[in-house]
Amino acid sequence: MTRSRVLLLLALAAGIAAFFALGLQRYLTLDYLKAAQGEFTALYAERPLTVIAAYFGIYVAVTALSLPGALIMTLAGGAIFGLWVGTLVVSFASSVGATLAMLAARYVLRDSVKGRFGARLAEIDRGVQRDGPFYLFTLRLVPALPFFAINLLMGLTAMKAGTFYLVSQLGMLAGTLVYVNAGTQLAQITSLQGIVSPGLIGSFVLLGLFPLVAKKIVDAVKARKVYAKWADRKPARYDRNMVVIGAGAAGLVTSYIAAAVKAKVTLVEAHKMGGDCLNYGCVPSKALIKTATLVRQMRHSAEYGVKSAEWQLDFAQVMQRVERVVAEIAPHDSVERYTGLGVDVVTGRATIVDPWHVKIVRENGGEQMLSTRAIVIATGAQPFVPPLPGLQDVGYLTSDTLWELREQPKRLVVLGGGPIGCELAQAFARLGTEVTQIEMAPRLMGREDEDVSAYARQVLEADGVRVLTGHKALRCERGGAVGPGEGGEGSEGGDEAKFIVVEAGGVEKRIPFDQLLCAVGRVARLSGFGLEELGIPVQRTVVVNEYLETLYPNILAAGDVAGPFQFTHTAAHQAWYAAVNGLFGTFRKFKADYSVIPWVTFIDPEVARVGLNEQDAKEKGVAYEVTRYGIDDLDRAIADSAAHGWVKVLTVPGKDRILGVTIVGAHAGDLLAEYVLAMKHGLGLNKILGTIHTYPTMAEANKYAAGEWKRAHQPHALLAWVRRFHDWRRG
């Protein structure tokens, strides 16, 4: 906290202390006001402007310092000035004082709170920017709520002072009128409880509920306007409670939840049940990585005390194993399983015809039209193929088509340095393919901290990947022989050689390849489902609100097609909100919660993260402390010849509250779960340190990281006294 803030805080504290020390609170009582009413009235008649100015200043001071007595001051306004002048003076004085209190709280406390709760405060600020004036107005209509608390809390947000003042002026007017009017009848008032009667409080509560009811009415009017052009198509009865389009993670979980709460739900999938994760992404890539890791261990068997290991790689068998793994897991997402769970599963292509009808063209060409109360779009995403000149001519693979390979490419170019590109580049390199990875950005895995990116590059290069960061792909070419130094050891040329041309620092390079893998990201599947015809806004994803609703409240979206994350577990997380809001949103809606989202990049060693890392915290202006524990010191890691990596925890300065965790190491994705649980339920590092972790396990890394934090926050002054105590005990 800066010196000026400290001085202001001290001044405010001194003012409040003086108020009580001098006994000034006795002047802000009903008895004193009634006793002095005649004197104040006479003084006002003699010097009206002076009295109004003095009263105004005192009222502003009382509200600005959040002192008890604003109610008495309001009654005094009515008793001295009458209803209309009193209302006018009190209205402006209370609004000015409230704004000063808000600004003082903002100046003294906001930066400190932002440093400790930056992510949450940013989320609150977004809500305030969107609906803050409305909710402040609602709160101001209920005088039973302590206005001083509202002033202080609003000071912690980013609401503009002018907006705060105007909304306060308007919102407090009704209460001001009531209490000023009560002041005009001061002689008849025997206690403050008589003014704040249950009936009056009830009236104010109803008044405060009016804006909320009005907002519901406005929302209903807006919805009516949105649905107006389709009004003649709205059915009197519905075939289904919900239709879900897409049987990936989001669609499967949404339909499962809908069936579990006994809704009649139809799930439509045009291709393969299980979506991208089962068929093209998470499952096959992890199966391939497992084989690649085994090959690496056999190549380096001497590290484990085995002088040499005999093995022979059959790439076709490797890919057949991947296919078997997918087939073994497929029943978990099968038509049979979900039919058994009560879901009506249809294989076909779905098109939203209007907000309540979905047309399904089945595999056999037959058509079905279903009416439904709610629709969930869960169509997922697909690999992005860059518009690179010559790419179509040379041919390319994506993370969808890669699994059809049965002949191992001798030379593979991986275009993209994100998680998918890194995982597959390392896996193919370990299997013996000559891999070149090209990334336009200056480093791999740009969402991670620089130390993580550097380490990822180091381990990929150690496995034989040629990493070219800061290289922009220009075009692809076919034909011409491979020049000296272009193909690398063992490369082959010929008229049919294929090249990718890249540029770095103004210099072009030609890189030959047998296969090129595009791994530059994924784009939402937005076309062909009727979104354009319905006018549903789309950008990179379907545009949804915090409840996952589209332009039409009964049409929702979840998973990769909705963003903001493209993770299977996030899609499943969103599915709950889509199902519940779609089925029960008329009565209660839930905002999707993205406060604790973990993810893992499955290179070896793995990179796992939840919450903020250092670059995120710096970008968002969140103050943090870093605690780091090196896994090279962990007993189990040493025993497993996996003594590399680290645990890095970001915490609130001086506190054990976790802001984010990055783990680099073997089984990092599994180790992260403890931190995800802790962050979700508000547990700090002290709780992790106090939890028994089995020895010897990798999970002890979490305990030791917590121990590092504890050591850095030892109470040195107290320990010095404890040492003296022990010295004294020894005599």
Image (cartoon, helix red, strand yellow):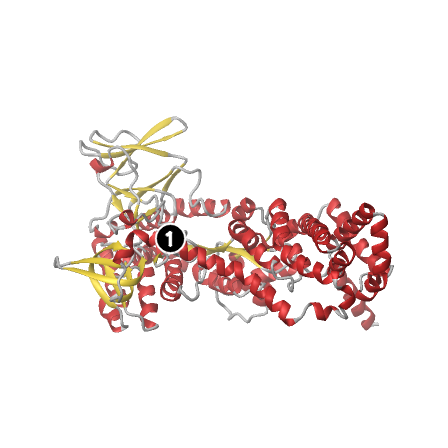
| Placement of 216 over or under 495, stated as above or below | below
Q: Quadrant of residue 298?
A: bottom left
Tell me the amino acid under the disc marked 1. Answer: Gln
The number of discs equals 1
Q: How crowded is the residue under tag 1: few (<14 C-alpha within 10 Å), some, or many (20+)?
A: some
Q: Residue at x 35, y 52 (%)?
A: 226
Residue 234 lies left or right of residue 662; in this view the side is: left
Q: Is residue 219 visible?
A: yes
Instruction: In this rendered view, identify the residue nearer to me: 246 or 99.
Output: 99
Instruction: In this rendered view, identify the residue nearer to me: 53 or 414.
Output: 53
The residue wearing badge 1 is 566
Residue 681 position in % (x across, y down) = 53, 66
Residue 142 lies left or right of residue 221; in this view the side is: right
Residue 651 position in % (x across, y down) = 59, 56
Q: Residue at x 81, y 72 (%)?
A: 729
Quadrant where the C terminus lies?
bottom right
Instruction: In this rendered view, identify the residue nearer to me: 435 or 505.
Output: 505
Residue 499 position in % (x across, y down) = 26, 34
The local secondary structure at tag 1 comes to loop
Q: Residue at x 65, y 64 (%)?
A: 144
Residue 620 position in % (x across, y down) = 55, 46
Residue 464 lies left or right of residue 443; in this view the side is: left
Q: Is residue 627 visible?
A: no
| Placement of 538 over or under 682, stated as above or below | above
Residue 689 lies left or right of residue 553; in this view the side is: right
